[in-house]
Image (tube, rainbow, N blue to C red):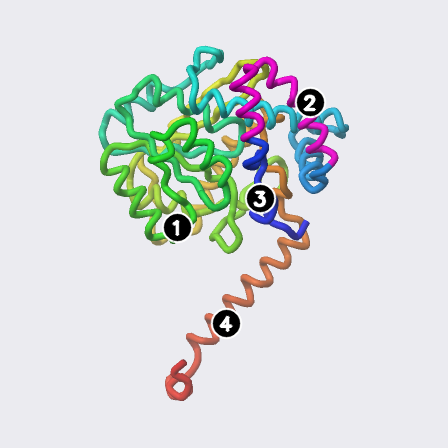
Amino acid sequence: MTETWTDRPEGGGHFALWLIRTIARKLGRRIARLHLYPITAYFLVKRAPERRASMAYLERALGRKTSWLDGAKHVHTFASTILDRVFLLGGPLDRFTIEVEGVDELHEKLDEGRGLLLFGSHLGSFEVLRVIAQRRPDYTIKIVLDKAQNPALTRLLDALNPTLARNIIDASQDGPTIVTEIQHAASQGALVALLVDRVRPGEPALPAQFLGATARFPTSPWLIAAALKIPVTLGFGLYQGGNRYKLVFELFDNAVEIPRNARAQSLQALIQRFASRLEHYVKLEPYNWFNFYDFWESEDELVSRHALDDAAVQRRTACRARPADSASQHPG
């Protein structure tokens, strides 16, 4: 697949979310869930690239050959969490059974007043993190979200939870602006939540072993964490069927350190640690993985990328070695 995830239409687009929201609010969650079966069938038939990516991923996660039934369960789980956005973002949470693990340590870190980075992924439901806001309304929660890439979710937040919508840090801004906003929020003692498992085109990334093969993960979240010197916690909102969720928090580091003299190695180690913890939870709930694109690099892609990296190094080396008088003739 030559497309990246940013080239594909948004999963759970505006019309789909509007339709689900309307059905859910007028008929209730139980009736709305019946509509997930035709939605699942439509997705499997009409979204062939996502279907192929789903089946390839499931073979890695399940360790066996997969069938259309596995693919259908995967998509149905995704559709279920999309439906539950309507209730998790705006309604009372008592309709759900939500098991929470590790939240006391998260509260302790936030009570220090230094701020906290909550690193999540496209595993399960990030919306279930609203449990934190309900249990401790004194916390400020900021969410880093690309409004341009997620217009439907942005509109849904505006409609269902204006407070959360106002606290979005738009990830489509330039890098320095995003970092400044995160730094300001942290200085006010806020929890800043962001997803750290997808690489945008052109974004710096490093490889890690994930489910038996090489995948690339972005480096910028870890550089931000190292610059801010505040606690980093991992968060996973795992959907377990019906109305059941399990919300897990893990303290990743009290203050991320990236020494200047070992920057690449330190970043690599951090990303591999994260990939290993992500893999742990993926294996616990494999149908919760919602990256419906080719997440892993093929051997050809690895060779091509390394060739480009080597060429870039050679160009930089040649520039540094160029005589001064020659360089002065070409000031551009």
In percent of width and height, residue 283 lies at 59, 26
- Identify residue for label 3: 215
Earlier residue among tags 2 and 1? 2
Earlier residue among tags 4 and 1? 1
- Identify residue for label 1: 173
Earlier residue among tags 3 and 2? 2
- Identify residue for label 2: 37
Regarding residue 136, the answer to whether it shows in the image is: yes
Magenta-span inclusion, residue 114: no
Earlier residue among tags 3 and 1? 1
Q: Amino acid at mark 1?
A: Gln
Circle 2 packing at 10 Å, graded few (<14), some (14-19), many (20+), is some
State the extent of the magenta-drawn residues as a range: 18-45
Circle 4 packing at 10 Å, graded few (<14), some (14-19), many (20+), is few
Q: Amino acid at mark 2?
A: Tyr
Label 4: state its secondary structure: helix
Q: Are marks 3 and 2 in contact (CB under 8 Å)?
A: no
Earlier residue among tags 4 and 2? 2
As drawn, is 88 to the left or to the right of 297? left
Q: 277 above or below 238?
A: below
In percent of width and height, residue 26 lies at 54, 17
Magenta-span inclusion, residue 20: yes
In percent of width and height, residue 64 lies at 73, 28
- Image quarter in which the C terminus is found: bottom left
- Mark sitting on residue 315: 4
Front-most of 157 and 187?
157
Regarding residue 266, the answer to whether it shows in the image is: no
